[in-house]
Image (cartoon, helix red, strand yellow):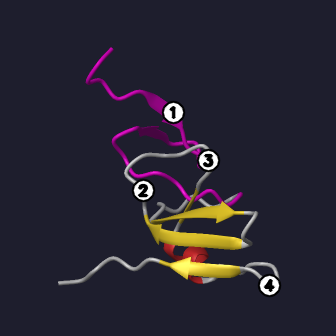
Amino acid sequence: MLGVPSERASRSGHSLTEMDGRLCSKVACAREAVATLTYDYGDKMAALGPLAPASQPHAHDLCAPHADRLSLPAGWLVVRHEALRA
């Protein structure tokens, strides 16, 4: 049905709707995602930015603590896109 959010179970067992916040992609983390991480394996680069408007199959949504502690293999570059603040 159009306009009706579908329900899914969260990792914590609570029901979420598509209109609720997305969860962190890290295993066993039930925090709300605030950032999206994407990789370019060919260039050994990762981009971390504000949460994407929609979930993407090749992107990883992260909560604030996991986004802050992001580490990559030696030789990789991380590009952090910060949201502008007023």
Residue that appears at 41% across and 27% down:
6
Q: CA distance from mark 3 to mark 2?
A: 20 Å
Could you say whether the residue bearing mark 4 is in a helix, strand or loop?
loop
Q: Which numbered disc flags the more N-terminal residue, 4 or 2?
A: 2
x and y, in percent, of residue 10 in the image: 55, 43
Q: Would you say the magenta stretch is mainly helix, strand or loop?
A: loop
Q: Nearer the viewer, mark 4 or mark 2?
A: 4
Distance from Cα at disc 4 to Cα at disc 3: 33 Å
Q: Residues within 10 Å of mark 2 (few under 14, many from 20)?
A: some
Disc 1/disc 2 C-alpha distance (Å): 20 Å
In the picture of the structure, the residue carrying the numbered disc 2 is: 52
Nearest to the observer: residue 85 or residue 41: 41
Q: CA distance from mark 4 to mark 1?
A: 38 Å
Magenta span: 1-27
18 in magenta: yes
Residue type (three-letter) at the residue carrying disc 2? Ala
Which residue shows up at 33% across the image and 41% down it?
19
Q: Residues within 10 Å of mark 3 (few under 14, many from 20)?
A: some
Kindly identify the amino acid type of the residue bearing the numbered disc 1: Arg
Name the residue rendered at 67%, 81% in the picture.
77
